[in-house]
Amino acid sequence: MGHGRLKKKTAVVTGGASGIGMAIALRFGREGANVIVNDVSDSGEDIAKEIIQSGGSAMFFKADLRRREEAAALMQAAYERFGSLHILVNNAGVSGGKSVVAAEDKDWERIMDINMKGSWYCSKFAIPFMIESGGGSVVNIASTHAYRTQQDHFPYQSSKAGMIAMAYGICVDFGSKNIRANSICPGFVETPLAEEHMRQFPNREEKAKAMLATYPLGRFGQPEDVAAAAVFLASDDAAYISGTTLVVDGGRSALQRAE
């Protein structure tokens, strides 16, 4: 059960069919929000139904956010259905990458089109409706890769750093309209996308053990950990928080191993 922290709020959650996005959508529903679950997968319909069956209010809207007109239609549909729009969670994204030298145009375009352009389009078309609704909160799901990264993660880390910078811009440009914008930087979170990444390693168990040793809390993140942070930033509890970045990584960023 939630505590009604998002009661009477309308929220769009992109990439809401699985992983972090699914956890955020479900948690928002428990907190009383009208939830618009967006994804390119039809399984997003199941998430919307689960919210409704649990006593919440939700709808599914399939849209490819790389396409300007589909992002605009998503926000229009949300506003028309519920008569307001207060929260946008820019979560839809892809990972992967290569080195700066090895990356090709297609690598850059695939990641930037979804992670950055999709978040830009959604913000562009959501903010006017937020202003009409009396204010709102944009929450970008970035990554700790924006601060420190691993080999062969360009342009992924660049896209996540860009999402943080975009939140800063929204904060500065629209603060006077009661629009807040913040970012969450998760560490390694156990999601289907993360599992797909781990499958590339032949020594998967050894890799996971070595990674886990860098997390002071002794466990990997769960989607619900990020969802809890998203609820806070989207809610009135964070009414005076804008232009900030919340790291949700189990303390990994604090650890410096002795050489």
Image: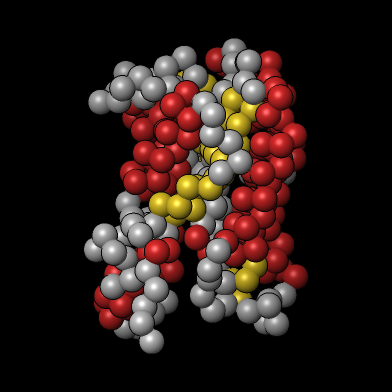
Q: How is the image coloured?
A: secondary structure
Residue at horizontal 55 percent and vertical 63 percent from the top: 147
Q: Is residue 186 left or right of residue 222?
A: right
Q: Is residue 99 left or right of residue 95?
A: right
Foreground: 245 or 43? 245
Residue at horizontal 33 percent and vertical 44 percent from the top: 224
Labels in figure, total: 0
Quarter of the picture containing the C terminus is bottom left
Q: Quadrant of residue 126?
A: top right
Q: Quadrant of residue 81?
A: top right
Quarter of the picture containing the N terminus is top left
Q: Is residue 184 left or right of residue 134?
A: left
**Residue 135, position in %: x, y?**
62, 21
**Residue 152, position in %: x, y?**
57, 77
- Residue 29 can be seen in this image: yes
**In the image, residue 194 above or below residue 124:** below
Foreground: 111 or 88? 88
**Residue 168, position in %: x, y?**
66, 44
**In the image, residue 116 above or below residue 32:** below
Residue at horizontal 42 percent and vertical 33 percent from the top: 231
- Residue 36 can be seen in this image: no
**In the image, residue 255 above or below residue 185:** below
**Residue 9, position in %: x, y?**
49, 19
Q: Is residue 70 left or right of residue 183?
A: right
